[in-house]
Image (spheres, rainbow, N blue to C red):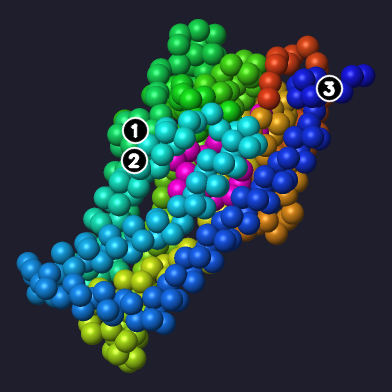
Amino acid sequence: METTTQQSNNATIDTERQKKAREYARKRRRLSFINMGIAALALLFIFWSELNIVLRNLLQPLNWQPVPGWYPWQVLVYLLILTLGYQVITFPLDYYGGFVLPHRYGLSTMTLRSWLADLLKGLVLSLILEILAIELIYLLLATQPQTWWLWVALIMLFFTVVMANLAPVLILPIFYKFTPLPEGELTQRLLALADRTHTRVRGVFTMHLSSKTTAANAALMGLGNTRRIVLGDTMLDRYTPDEIEVVLAHELGHHVHHDLWKLILTQSVLTLGSLYLLNLALHWAVEIQHYFLSLTDVAAMPYLFLLTAIFGLIVLPLSNGLSRAIEYQADEYALQTTKMVAAFKSAMIRLANQNLADIEPSPLIEFLFHDHPAIGKRLKHADEFADRHALNASISAESLAPVSSTEPPGIPSSGSSTPDAAH
Ligand SMILES: [Zn+2]
């Protein structure tokens, strides 16, 4: 039996690609640790040098106060200096991790120009959202000093729901082109699948990922009237119709299980908890330690950022664990509704090969950083399903078309504008 890459890509895990996948994951991980280290050092330096106090004193003249205790201009300029300063310091790492590395591993198809354009668009977008959030927090700190955290959590929940609804029509098109899936066999199959499972799908769209990446991806996006299944064009041209149907069934599973709502609500509870702790820490720093002048002192901003980042790191394994459980259930749903175990497995193998996904990360790494079960586990799941239902799980060679592939790198893709792959 010949074991060229071309051949092995079809039905078996490509061991060469796996070696690269592990290397790539290791480099990405190291990079995100360095990034975190830099952020921590920068914040510690700010506290040690009292730069936060110096900066606040410099901004004293911006004292327009529409509501007693709320200085929107001070907050705005302080936030801009912090965020832009951080962007400048971490730009070399962004460039290496976001452009150089993916190119070196053949995962990116972007020109430097388009990469920079996306970076800028992402920065502007996140700045706008950050400014709104931080101004809101300072306004509530001034008016509701005891219950501000509760209000912030409630408003953020509302905003998250609105954003989840608007994202597929307003936000993602800024970065990617979407077109409705052309009429044809696939659409027919999907409609039949939706019919069989008594679910209503509002639409299936092709996301033109190939202009940016070689990796394949699919996802359920939107809420309410914008809810849709999205397939990367990097998947459409390389996967067999059976494989795509299984992927669609997986996405349909997310819809049937109301997974977006589950994620939003869990995230909201975690946010509420973090904000409450933030409230305690802020009152302690102001009223007991007198580190800051008042609750609305802008000099406390780096302190709030540091704590938020620490809480985020603490809850990350929790939300990843929930996400993996949800993904497992969506896989189960896909297997149940299609009974196509072989197609499921070959789709996973294609993803691993194409997206440079490590199929067996160390358990600790998976526990901490992966929001999808490792592909090795998903393959095992399919075998167990086949055993349970006495189905044939072997992949026949003739059912397979050409491919190359990967699963989403499980590392939290901070700052990446790519929606989660094979979701
Ligand atoms: Zn999924």
Q: Nearer the viewer, residue 421 or 153?
A: 421
Picture coordinates of residue 386 (x, y %)?
77, 31
Can residue 307 be spotted in the picture?
no
Which is more N-terminal, label 2 or label 3?
3
Name the quadrant containing residue 3: top right
Gap between marks 3 and 2, in whole Å? 41 Å
Eyeballing the image, is 328 above or below 213?
below
Placement of 145 over or under 23, stated as above or below: below
**Residue 339 in the image: x percent, y percent?**
69, 24
Q: Quadrant of residue 69?
A: bottom left
Per the image, the residue denoted by label 1 is 174
- Viewer-closest of 203 and 41: 41
Residue 205: % across, % down: 43, 22
**Between disc 2 and disc 1, whose residue precedes?**
2
- Under circle 1, the secondary element is helix
- Identity of the residue drawn at 76% across and 38% down: 18
Q: Looking at the picture, how far across and down is residue 87, in whole percent?
A: 40, 55
Residue 178 visible in the snapshot: yes
Which residue corresponds to mark 2?
121
Q: Secondary structure at mark 2?
A: helix
* The image quarter in which residue 143 lies: bottom left
Q: For this rendering, which residue is in front, 94 or 298?
A: 94
Residue identified by numbered label 3: 4
Examine the rendered structure and indicate whether residue 320 appears above or below residue 149.
above
Residue at point 48% right, 25% down? 211
Query: What amino acid type should be assigned to the residue bearing mark 2?
Result: Lys
Residue 293 is one of the magenta-drawn residues: no
